[in-house]
Image (cartoon, rainbow, N blue to C red):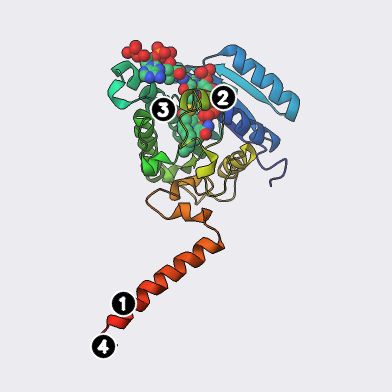
Amino acid sequence: MFSHNTLTQKRILITGGGTGLGKEISRGLLQCGAEVYICGRRESVLQECCEELSADTGGKIHYRICDIRDPDSIEAMVDSIFQEGPLTGLINNAAANFIAPTKDLSPRGYQAIRSTVMDGSFYTVLSVGKRWIKQQIPGSIVSNLVTWVWTGSAFVVPSAMAKTAIDSMTKSLAVEWGRYGIRVNAVAPGPFPTEGAWDKLNPTGKSTGATDSESVPMRRYGKMPELANLMTFLQADGCEYLTGQTIAIDGGHHLAAPSTFASLADLNDDDWQEIRDSIKASAEKEKSQRSTG
Ligand SMILES: CCCCCCC/C=C/C(=O)SCCNC(=O)CCNC(=O)[C@H](O)C(C)(C)COP(=O)(O)OP(=O)(O)OC[C@H]1O[C@@H](n2cnc3c(N)ncnc32)[C@H](O)[C@@H]1OP(=O)(O)O
Ligand SMILES: NC(=O)C1=CN([C@@H]2O[C@H](COP(=O)(O)OP(=O)(O)OC[C@H]3O[C@@H](n4cnc5c(N)ncnc54)[C@H](OP(=O)(O)O)[C@@H]3O)[C@@H](O)[C@H]2O)C=CC1
C-alpha cells in the first residue's frame, strides 16, 4: 500500500510497542522507513521485540523502559529520546484493561486502568507536545482508542471512560495546537485478537460479544497490516489538514448494534419472500378497509 520510503526521516514513539498491536504497528512503520522507539515496563519483552523487528525489516528500532502511569518516568524517557533527535510522531498505544462487574471494582482496580489509559496518554502527549512547541517542530499524535468511545461498554467501564477522555483530548488539542502544526487524531479499532487483550477480555472463552468475529458485519477479525497501514497514513506527510478525528477500523462492528436490523443479514431469499408476502397481506387488508384513496 505504501512505498518503503513513505516514512523516511520520521522518528516515532509507540508506547506499549513491545507486544500485540503496538508491535505490529511498529513493524509497519519500520517497513516504511521510520525510525521507531517503543516503551513498556518489561525489558526482556522490549529487547526481544527490537531484535525480531530489526532482523525482519532492517529498520532502526530502540526501546526505553518506562511506566506511563508515572509522569516522571515519561519525562525521563522523552528527554532521553529528544537528546538523540526530535520525534516527529507519537502513538499512544499502551493500555490496561480487564472485564469485571463494575460493582466489584476496587479504587485500585479503577485506578490501574485510568492511570494507564487516560493519565499515561495525556502525560506522554504533554511531554512530547511541549518540546515540539518550544522547538517549533510540527508533529503527529495518534491515540489507539476503541469504538466504545461512541457506544460505551458494560463490564469494561473504566476503560470505556478513559478512552473516551482521550477522544475528547484529541478533539480539544487539535484545536489548541493546530497553529503549531501539531495534528492530533485517533483510531478506534474493533476486535484484533492479541494475547494481551484476549487474556483480559476473554479469559475463559465465555465472554464473547465484543471479542466475537461473527458479530462483525465483515464476519472476520481485523488484520494487523490493516491497522498498521492506517497508522502509517496518519504519520505520513500529505494529509496534514486531517486533524481532530477518531477513525473507526472495525469492519462496521459498532454500527451493527442489536438496536438495528444488522442480524437480518443472516436471512436467505426464502426468508425475505416470506417477509414480503406477510407485509403485502397486511397492506392488502388495510387497503380493503380504506374509505378513501
Ligand atoms: C470492540 C472491540 C473488542 C476488543 C476491544 C479491546 C479494547 C481494549 C483493550 C485493551 O486495552 S487490552 C490491554 C490489555 N493489556 C493489559 O491490560 C496490559 C496491562 N495490564 C496490567 O498491568 C494488569 O493486567 C492490570 C491488572 C490492569 C494492572 O496490574 P497491576 O500490577 O498494576 O495491578 P494489580 O496489583 O494486579 O491490581 C490492581 C487492582 O486491580 C484489581 N484487579 C485486577 N484484576 C482484576 C479483575 N479481573 N477484576 C477485578 N479487579 C481486578 C486488583 O485486585 C487490584 O485491586 P486491589 O485488590 O488492590 O484493591
Ligand atoms: N486487541 C484489540 O482487539 C484492541 C486493542 N485496542 C487497543 O490497542 C492497544 C494495544 O492493545 P493490545 O496490543 O491488544 O494489548 P497488549 O496487552 O499486547 O498491549 C498493551 C501494551 O501496553 C504496555 N503497557 C501497559 N501498561 C503500561 C504502563 N504502565 N507503562 C508502559 N507500558 C504499559 C504493555 O507492556 P508492559 O506490560 O510490558 O508494560 C503492552 O506492551 C490498547 O490501547 C488497546 O486498548 C483497541 C481496540 C481493540
Residue with the mark numbered 1: 286
Numbered mark located on residue 292 in the image: 4
Q: Earlier in the sequence, mark 4 or mark 2?
A: 2
Labels 1 & 4 near each other (Cβ < 8 A): no
Kindly identify the amino acid type of the residue bearing the numbered disc 3. Val
Q: Earlier in the sequence, mark 3 or mark 1?
A: 3
Q: Look at 64% across and 39% down and name the residue there.
A: 225
For marks 2 and 3, give the CA distance: 18 Å
Kindly identify the amino acid type of the residue bearing the numbered disc 2. Glu
Camera-side mark, 1 or 4? 1
SS category of the residue bearing label 4: loop
Q: Earlier in the sequence, mark 3 or mark 4?
A: 3
What x and y, as percent, mark residue 208?
47, 34
Residue with the mark numbered 3: 117
Kindly identify the amino acid type of the residue bearing the numbered disc 4. Thr
For marks 2 and 1, give the CA distance: 57 Å
SS category of the residue bearing label 3: helix
The answer to whether the residue bearing label 2 lies less than 8 angstroms from the nearest atom of ligand 2 is yes
The answer to whether the residue bearing label 3 lies less than 8 angstroms from the nearest atom of ligand 2 is yes
Q: Earlier in the sequence, mark 1 or mark 4?
A: 1
Task: Judge from the rendering whether residue 55 lies leftward or rightward of residue 46; answer left or right.
Answer: right
What x and y, as percent, mark residue 226?
61, 42
Q: Earlier in the sequence, mark 2 or mark 3?
A: 3
